[in-house]
Image (spheres, grey):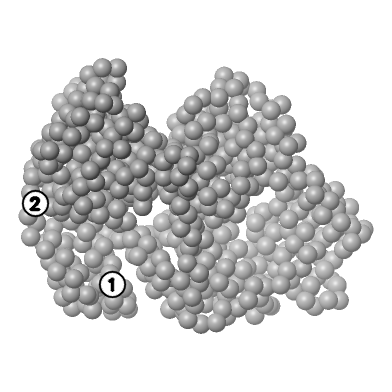
Amino acid sequence: MLKRLLVLGMGLGLALMTTSCGPKKPILVITPKQPAPSVTLAPPPRKSRALMALVEQARVSEDVTDILPAFDVFILGDDPVLRDEARYRRVQVMLEKHVPGAYREAQIVLTELPGHALAPYARYWLARWWAEQDDHERALQELEGVLRHPALTAELAERALSLGASSSQRVEASEAVAWLLTAASLDVSRREDWLRLASRRINADDLPPLHERGDVDPALLAELDVQLARRFLIQGRMDLVSRIDDWLAGLPAPEAWRRQVHSWTSGVSRAARIGVLLPLTGTYARYGRAALRGMRMALAEGQEQAVLRIEDTGGDPGRCVTAYERLHEENVDIIVGPLLKSSAEALAGHLHGDIPVIALTNAVDLAGNSPALFVHTLSPLAQAQFIAAYALEHGAHRFAVLELDRPGSRQEGDRFAQMLAAMGGEVLDTLVLPADEIDVRDRLRELKMRTDDEMRLADLDEELSIFLPEAALEPRVPTMLDALYLAMPGRRVALIAGQLAYSDLTGISLFGSSLWDDGHLLDDRGRYLTRARFARPAQDASVESRLRELRFLYRQVWGKEQPSKLSLLAYDTARLAIVVAGRLGLSGRQAIRALHDQTGFPAVTGEVTFDAHGAGQKRMIMYRIIDGELMPAS
């Protein structure tokens, strides 16, 4: 696809961040590296204030019919600089608003003004236009033109690579891998991340052609092979690990890589000793038993030997600490649990630091209390970082948060606000809605009034009156908001979305967590949710068949319809522990380092990677609604 044009050391515009527990601990924000191109990139294009005022007005307007002719005033004017920019800005608005004829107009302008500073931007707008129509192959083709253009800027290259990362997940594996390998060769600061994405898309049948065709950088291929070998080892695909071991012999790989992969080919594993801290009696016993059933399903697969050393905490923090000390004296490899936040809080201050503990609590902030403490959860609190990063990447910086008057909803909204602020965004307002109130239009109107951007309206009036004195444009009062975050289930989202239009909160994006995925988001076929995006755990194609097998096993043993989410989370956590302690043969601090490996661990509840503090981050995908159906978003 793309040829190597430059080497960019950039972070794709996402600040990677993690948090530690407690109000006195600051949020750690790791900022992306600055671009370090091997060729000279063009400076940012100059922008006309008048033309950008028109673009901004178009963005907040539902109908741009009266705005497009305003560009013609500049196109027909005497200033050649303004004339050419106006043609591109008109194309920008047409593509962003999906005006009929936008593609044809863009092709004409690009043909007549190919060397203009906005030409690569127009190709990026086209790529985004194709992606919004789910034609991601065409989007990647346009992005190729972006990166090849001599007027490419550092900022545009960052945006193009980011869009390419998203579109590559929606095309055939061969197309995706080609793009991701190219990105790995261009973006040296995130090379490992690009290769990690490529390793997730490669099929076993694609490996021989990839090694035989000869057009992939051998050093890049060697690094990819090591990631693939680890992934196949975790999956138990020892035949593929052996093949990779053979391929590495002919590639310029460091000797340490070769030794590591060769050691994996033996397939020898030891019995993992897994400690268990769960409330099996008392108030929370049913939750503890559900988790234990999930762990026993993991052992029942019989691929590796493992021993569970089970301790009943009874839901009591003191008993939890005492039980932990017993497991530590027995020198288990990894401990799964506790389940309750109070027990995890009590335990955090007593960890010795030489045995990893994977808690199943929703309190993700606790992970920062000890290097040995990890948190694996399905809570939307753990999704806030991903959603905030996605929103900022797509231009949504200023938010209002809508919460229900319930503890879980308030915690989710507050967590998102915390993550957004840490990454450079801003929450302008928080609206707490009564949990049982259906009609909230008056409250939404008050929110709109509190976030009206009177200054921006005055600036638009001034710009348009100076440059277009005869244009009959009446700008509506714009809001300062770029988006809303709705910390609530999909049923309430569907009800509130229809009320936003009555409150003049239109033309802004809506974001939410996997709580939206409750089966009710499409109650009205998503009529008012065309600008909505929500997170869902990413699932490989093999997960659905694996889930069917687990449900069948669960019914056979316990006679229930299907395992709970907690049972599946515990199953995944036990499988993870067995892989690290059994298949990889690690314990103690080596096991702790292995859990931090950013390649991640496959799981039926969504692939998990533990961040710098030990908080489990599920590999997520944003979804949107198209023609009444849920589809992956760009």
Callout 2–callout 1 Cβ contact below 8 Å = no
Residue at (84% x, 51% y) in the render = 458
**Amino acid type of disc 2?**
Ser
Sequence order check, earlier mark of 2 and 1:
1
Q: Which circle marks residue 236 in the picture?
A: none
On residue 269, the disc is 2
Residue 220: percent from left, percent from top: 31, 73
Indicate the amino acid at tag 1: Leu
Q: Could you say which is closer to the camera, residue 129 or residue 475?
A: 475
Q: Nearer the viewer, mark 2 or mark 1?
A: 2
Q: Residue at x 23, y 65 (%)?
A: 226
* Res 506 → quadrant: top right
236 left or right of 148 in image: left
Residue found 31% across the figure and 38% down from its top: 348
Residue drawn 38% across the image and 68% down it: 191
- The answer to whether one can see residue 196 in this image is yes
Q: Does dot 1 land on a helix, a strand or a loop?
A: helix
Residue 558, given in percent of the width and then of the height, sits at 18, 23
Give the quadrant of the N terminus. bottom left
How far across and down, in percent of the image, does residue 202 sit?
Answer: 29, 61
The reply to whether residue 547 is visible in this rendering is: no
Vertical order, 170 against 152 (above or below):
above
From the top left corner, tell me how far across and down residue 94 is, in percent: 69, 59
Q: Is residue 101 left or right of residue 627?
A: right
Q: Which residue is mark 1?
A: 221
For label 1, the crowd category at 10 Å Cα-Cα, with few meaning under 14, some 14 to 19 and many 20 or more, is some
Q: Residues within 10 Å of mark 2 (few under 14, many from 20)?
A: some
Q: Secondary structure at mark 2?
A: loop
In this rendering, the answer to whether 388 lies above or below 36 is above
Q: Quadrant of residue 352?
A: top left
